[in-house]
Amino acid sequence: MPTSTNIFLTTVLSAIALWAEKPSPIIWESAYTRKPPVIDGALDDIWKRAKPVTVMVREAMGGDHPKPVVLRALHTDDSIYIAAEWPDATKSDMRDPYIWNPQTKKYERPSKPDDQFAIEFPIKGDFGISMLTVTREFTADVWHWKAGRGNPIGWVDDKYHVISQKPLPEAKKHALHGGRSVYIVRLQDAGTPSFKLKPEPQSYQGDLVDSFEQQKPSGSVADVRGKGVHNGKSWFLEMGRKFDTGHPEDDAVIDPKKDNICAIAVLDDELYEEHSVSTVIVLRFKGGPGKAK
């Protein structure tokens, strides 16, 4: 069965394929601010400094049903802050909950998605190509927000992917045409995540019980703060992270002195390949120390 880390694999494959058809990538500008935004899922006045850019995401499989995502970015001397707003008529903030079966008098746990958003930055190597490649290798940093897991206490899952033509520990082998293979590692950053699975209740605690509980994260997996709020029609999400987390083995260093490429994905009650993706986006910094005002 696919894991949640498989989601962004399809995302980047699709994003890069779409980018190849559109040679002029979207430019997303970040504005300088001395005062950082409060990461609470609210569009505060400080975001008026940021120039919004609308990015269309499309279904990863087929490229249909375009959906607008409004992106904003702010930066301080040492951190980047990202805001994303996209339409979603249904708030899905519980992943695979326990559901009471009155006939068996037991809980069941069928698959049920929570809403999600992800953004990926290259760490090293040739990011601007397909992951299923026999000629290039790269490592990428993934910030994966999940409405039903880290969001309740304001955290984003921090992950990384490694693509190689050589076998690696914990890598999955993908056979390609011509008898060649590529090895892909999809891992969570080191440390304690912001949520964990709760054991199945042994007695009735309600018809619907959350199967995850939140906990204080630590280590590299706790590098990205994030909070999303649903207003009945759409999500507004804020995320923030240091340019340099001090964890170069699994995090990209965001350099405000140059352009940084990335791609986004949105999941609306969806899992795995059923999600919407962007083309590759260029994040460009305006203002701040050493930058034009």
Image (cartoon, rainbow, N blue to C red):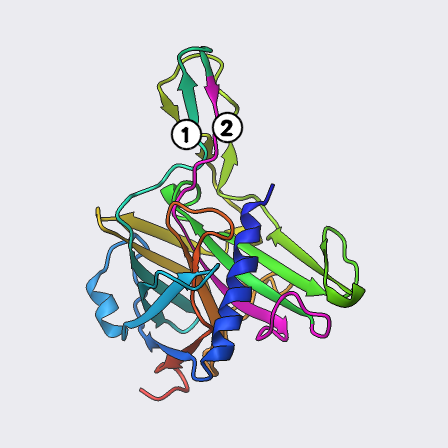
Residue 217, position in %: x, y? 50, 44
User: In the image, what residue occupies the spot 59% across and 65% down?
Assistant: 140
Asked whether 75 falls inside the magenta stretch, the response is no
62, above or below 213, in the image = below
The crowd level at tag 1 (other Cα within 10 Å; few <14, some 14-19, many 20+) is some
Q: Secondary structure at mark 2?
A: loop
User: In the image, what residue occupies the spot 51% across and 53% down?
Assistant: 273
Task: Work out which quarter of the rendered image holds the N terminus and state it.
Answer: top right
In the image, is 26 to the left or to the right of 173? left
Q: Secondary structure at mark 1?
A: loop
Identify the residue under disc 1: 210
User: In the image, what residue occupies the spot 48% across and 70% down?
Assistant: 262
Region rendered in magenta: 107-136
Type of amino acid at the residue the image marks with label 1: Asp
Q: How many marks?
A: 2
Instruction: Kindly tell me whether residue 65 is visible in this rendering.
Output: yes
Identify the residue under disc 2: 198
Residue 189, position in %: x, y? 59, 53
Asked which quadrant contains residue 83, the reply is: bottom left
